[in-house]
Amino acid sequence: MERTGWNIRVISRVILGATLAATSTAIVHPISKAKATVVETNPELSESQGISAQSTTDVTTGGENTQSSENPISDTLLSQSLPMGENRANTTPGVNRRNLRVFANGKTKSLNQVTNVSQLRDVSPGDWAYEALRSLVERYGCIAGYPDGTFRGNRTTTRFEFAAGLNACLNQIERLIIDGSGDVSREDLQALGRLIQEFEAELATLGTRVDNLEDRVQFLEDNQFSTTTKLVGEIPFLLADAFGDDVDVQTVFQEKIRLQFVTSFTGKDKLYTRLTTGNIGNSFADELGTNEGRFAFDGPGNNDVTMDRIHYVFPVNDNLQATVMANLGGHHFYADTFNPGLEAGGGANGALSRFAERNPIYRFGLGGQGLGLRYKFSNSLEFSGGYLARGGNVPTDGSGLFNGNYSAMAQLVFAPFESFKIGLTYLNGYDVESGRRFAFGGTGTNLGNLAPTALEQLGVEATPVSSNSYGIETLFKVSPSFNIRGWAGLTKARLIGLGDADIINYSLIFAFPDLGKQGSLGAVVVGAEPYLVDLEVPGDDDFEEDVPFHVEAFYKYKLTDNISITPGVIWLAAPNQDEDNDDVFIGALRTTFSF
């Protein structure tokens, strides 16, 4: 609010100068310690403002000196203070130092002491100052009034309330003079000049008080936050079945419950603790003999309650955000996966299948403990990096944070346009033993996951695996109602002591946000889940490498703010990368309750 103090000093001089230039009837007479002057007012101003006209008079005072009449006013200042179109030629002639002295030496009559506005503790209707300000408010609209649209102009105000209103009028009239957008009369300039004199102390103090108030408000805003916890729940009901010549499964009706507590200590951080239970299990994976087509939201199979997610997310500074994962860590929790709406973190408000959520290489290290960082260089460039250790909570040999399975990721995201972005992703991992530890998080063929049972059929023993994975992801928002997303991933795995393997996956997604209704979503997913394309090991390396196509279509209809219904179908061609296997069709109807 330094501007308030500046306004007071500058505009008070400008307006007082304009007042003296406009009329010669408002001259202050220097007096002795025993004398003061009463300012003679303009009769026209008196009628418009309700101020009684008085001649300039000597008045006995309490011994305080008034300000000197020596108040030099430059022509430039006078011309600047006048409204547009009213130049020096229109000012009252003969106003200069010589004339000021003549007026100051004029004879005056002695009158009894009158009450000065500056002596009043408050300002009441009927006071000349009150009426003068009210006239300015009505003429220039410098005070908006109360929230109910009333001005309440008949109420007594404190001197500081009055000064605040006066300051608003000063600012408004200053803008009108500078912009030339309004006609400010001489009478109003005179009234302002006198008001400034009477309330100079309050105007000077006003800026300091407001500054102090702003500091106190800022302190309260910075310190008022108290720890809060919010409960977020999600419950999907699932009706599903699988069809195919070699498929023998029954129609199922299943459920899952997620209760997540989101706690904030500062208002900017979040502590996630989540309880999960349900009876969906591994979808149809056991019956189909493959992880392909597994639902994104499957999980516990016998309604056991588990504490699965414990994460703390907080800003390090304006550009850097950290995610500490004490349980159920995943790279997708802190990094961009380029699939809004379909990516739901394993929840039931996104895609039907796990594969349709994100590039499967993000799933390396899923379930571990670790740290993720996300740094924003600018609106168009971002970096993410993290480290996860599966079994990082286990103190035995071959486990822990740095002596067991791990996955480290680095990702660079470039967004040259608001509607387009592309990412380059790299992951390095090590798994003490193959099988489910080296896995794409419940996606892909058995050979693609280097499953021990699949390798044994080729005469290859299970062994530790180190891997380097490379991914490219993109998102193109063609329009608000149509997006194209996709990715490609390559994993070069080394079976320690045996040889190398190459695994690939890719996907193209057409998404239709707000299809049919705000908050609804339609999508078509076409791609191939992770599958083995090259294996260089001693022994029988002859294996099927047919493309295991994954085609998925669903429509999530937002019934209410808390309920959505999602019908969909998944088609698996050449399951387990073998076209001799019959195609599988999975149908699902998901109803999700969110609160």
Image (cartoon, grey):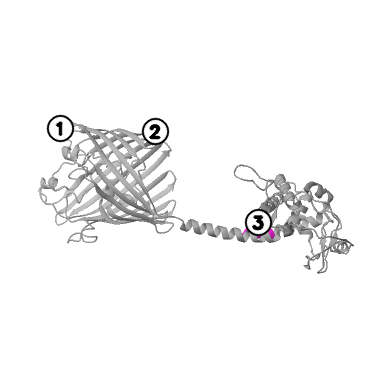
Label ID, residue 160: 3
Which is more toward the observer, 141 or 200?
A: 200
- Callout 3 amino acid: Phe
- Tell me if residue 280 is in the magenta stretch: no
Question: Magenta residues: mostly which secondary structure?
Answer: helix
Instruction: Work out whether residue 78 can be spotted.
Output: no
Q: For this rendering, which residue is in front, 166 or 251?
A: 166
Q: Position of residue 329 (x, y in %)?
A: 28, 52
The residue stretch that appears in magenta: 1-9
Crowd around label 1: few <14 · some 14–19 · many ≥20 (10 Å): few
Q: Quick one: label 2 or label 3, which is nearer the N terminus?
A: 3
Mark 2 vs mark 3: give the one in front. Answer: 3
Give the Cα separation between the discs numbered 2 and 1. 36 Å
Secondary structure of residue under mark 3: helix
Quadrant of residue 582 within the rendered picture:
top left
Element type where label 2 sits in the image: loop
Say which residue appears at 78% left-offset and 61% top-offset.
74
Residue 477: image quadrant is: top left
Q: Nearer the viewer, mark 1 or mark 3?
A: 3
The residue tagged 1 is 246
For marks 2 and 1 on the same chain, the one whose residue lies earlier in the sequence = 1
